Amino acid sequence: MRKIMMVCVTILVATAVSSFAWTSADNAQHSAYDNGWTNNANGGSGFGAWTLSAAGSGNAGHFIGDPSAAGVSGMNVESFGQFANPNNDNTAYADRFMNDSGLDMEAGGTFTFDWGVNWDANNTSGGKGINFYNGGSAGTWLFTLKQTDSASILWNDANGGSGTLAANYGVNAMTLTLTLGASDASIGTITGTGRDGSEAISQALDFGGTLAPDSFRIWSENLDTGDQRQQYFDNFSVSSVPEPTTALLFIGGIAGLVYARRKRA
C-alpha cells in the first residue's frame, strides 16, 4: 500500500511541477514557412500562431528572407523580415502569444531572440522594434525595444523608464535575452551584445505592476526607402520556469497530505 501511495505521490509531484513550467521555440527555417511568413502560420512548438497585419500604400508586409540583403550579418539566410517603406503611413505588425494556451511567463523565465537592423528609419515618425504585452497587443503594454531615427537602440517601459539600450553602430545581429526577476515576474533584465559586436547590453526593466509578459509584437512603421532599413528576427525561444516558492508550497502540501494519510493508516 505504501509503495502504491509513493508512486501516486511521485506522479502528482511531477505533474504539479510540469504544470508550472513550459517552453516554446521557433525559427524561420521551419517547414511552416516554406510558403513565406503568412497570417496564422505557426512553426516550431509551444507558441501561438502569428497574427500579421499591414496598412498603407501597399509597401508594407512580411517575408522570409536573407538579412545579408540588408547588410546584416550573423543571422540565418532564412529569417523573419518586415518592410514598411517608403514613409507614407506604411505599417507592418506581427503579433504572437508566447504560449499556445495563453500562459504568462513565470518569475525566473527567459525569452531569447535574434534581431538584425542596419540603417535607421531616417525620419522622426518612423521606427522599428518589438513590444511586449500582457494580454496581447490589445491588452497591457509592458515595454519596447526600438530603433528610430538614429543608430541607437532604445528602450522604454510601463513604469516610465526610458533610455539607450545600445549606442554603437554596427551590422551584427544581436542575440538578446529577457530574464524575469527570480521572485517577481513584473520586472526583468535585457542582456546581450550590441550590433558592433562588443558593446555590452544589460538593462533593468519595470513593467509597472504585477503583470508578466505573455505576448509580443514586431513592428515597422514609416521607414525611408532602402532594403537596409528593413529589420529581421529569428530563433525565438521561451523557457518559463516555476517560481521556487510556489512549487515548494505545492509539493509541501502534497507531502502534508501523504503524512496525514499515513497517520490514519
Image (cartoon, grey):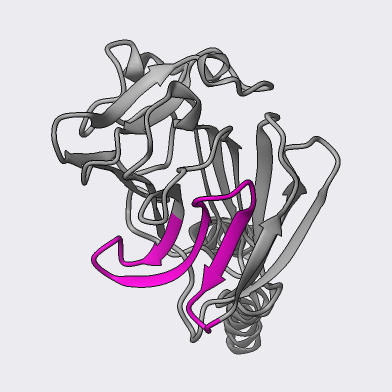
Q: Is residue 82 left or right of residue 212?
A: left
Which one is in front, 44 or 260? Answer: 44
Q: Position of residue 107 (x, y in %)?
A: 61, 70
193 left or right, relative to 139: right
Asked where in the image residue 214 lies, by quadrant, the reply is bottom left
Q: Nearer the viewer, residue 256 or 28?
A: 28
Q: Write the start and end of the magenta stretch as one range.
A: 131-160
Is residue 41 visible in the rendered image? The answer is: no
The residue sitting at 67% across, 50% down in the picture is 177
Residue at 61% x, 23% y: name it: 72
Image quarter of the N terminus:
bottom right
- The image shows residue 93, relative to residue 39, as above or below, that is below
- Asked whether 103 falls inside the magenta stretch, the response is no
Vertical position of residue 92 compared to residue 130: above or below? above
The residue closer to the viewer here, 188 or 143, is 143
In the shown orientation, is residue 27 left or right of residue 39? right
Please say whether residue 126 is visible from this viewpoint.
yes
Using the rendered view, name the quadrant where residue 254 is placed: bottom right
